[in-house]
């Protein structure tokens, strides 16, 4: 089963644990996570997903092996858009 690393902010949904999930594609993994932890799918939407260290380009069709590691990478927003030391004009 693939090892799925649950982001810290969502660990309350999984009893503070990562998950071992069966599935041959990322879509199957995500569907299984949702059945195990209702509501987690909506909370993960918008996150980039890395399978075995590579951010997926195939989305739900990305192949996943039983030895795979799946990580969710939260989108980062905000800031001023200025580089360090710059002043607004």
Image (cartoon, grey):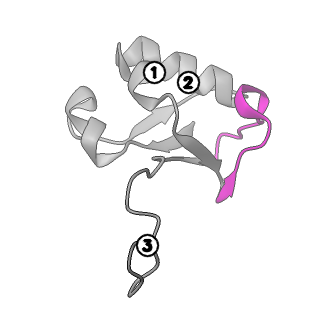
Q: Quadrant of the N terminus?
A: top right
- Splitting the image into 4 quarters, where does residue 87 fall? bottom left
Q: Is residue 70 above or below residue 44?
A: below
Frontmost residue, 60 versus 81: 81
Residue bearing mark 1: 41
Q: State if disc 3 and disc 2 touch (CB < 8 Å).
A: no
- Image quarter for residue 59? top right
Which residue, given by chain and number where applicable, does mark 3 sit on? 89
Magenta-span inclusion, residue 60: yes
Q: Is residue 41 visible?
A: yes
The crowd level at tag 2 (other Cα within 10 Å; few <14, some 14-19, many 20+) is some
In the image: residue 18, left or right of residue 26: left
* Residue annotated with mark 2: 30
Residue 49 magenta-drawn? no
Q: Position of residue 58 (x, y in %)?
A: 79, 36
- Magenta stretch mostly in which secondary structure? loop
Depth order, front residue of 53/43:
43
Q: Can residue 68 be seen in the rendering of this structure?
A: no
Is residue 88 rendered to the left or right of residue 68? Answer: left
Residue in view at x 35 percent, y 13 percent: 38
Relative depth, front residue between 48 and 65: 48
- Asked if the residues shown at circle 1 and circle 2 are in contact, with their CB atoms under 8 angstroms apart, the answer is yes
Please rate how many residues cluster around mark 3, counting C-alpha atoms within 10 Å: few if below 14, some from 14 to 19, many from 20.
few
**Mark 3 or 1, nearer chain start:** 1
Q: Position of residue 21 (x, y in %)?
A: 52, 30
Q: CA distance from mark 1 to mark 2?
A: 7 Å
Depicted 23 relative to depicted 89: above or below? above
Q: Nearer the viewer, mark 2 or mark 3?
A: 3
Nearer to us of marks 1 and 2 is 1
């Amino acid at each position: 089963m693939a090892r799925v690393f649950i982001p810290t902010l969502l660990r309350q949904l999984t009893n503070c644990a990562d998950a071992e999930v069966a599935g041959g594609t990322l879509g199957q993994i995500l569907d299984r996570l949702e059945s195990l932890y209702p509501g987690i799918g909506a909370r993960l939407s918008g996150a980039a997903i890395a399978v075995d260290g590579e951010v997926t380009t195939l989305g739900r069709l990305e192949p996943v092996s039983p030895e795979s590691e799946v990580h969710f990478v939260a989108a980062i927003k905000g800031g001023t858009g200025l580089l360090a030391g710059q002043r607004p004009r």
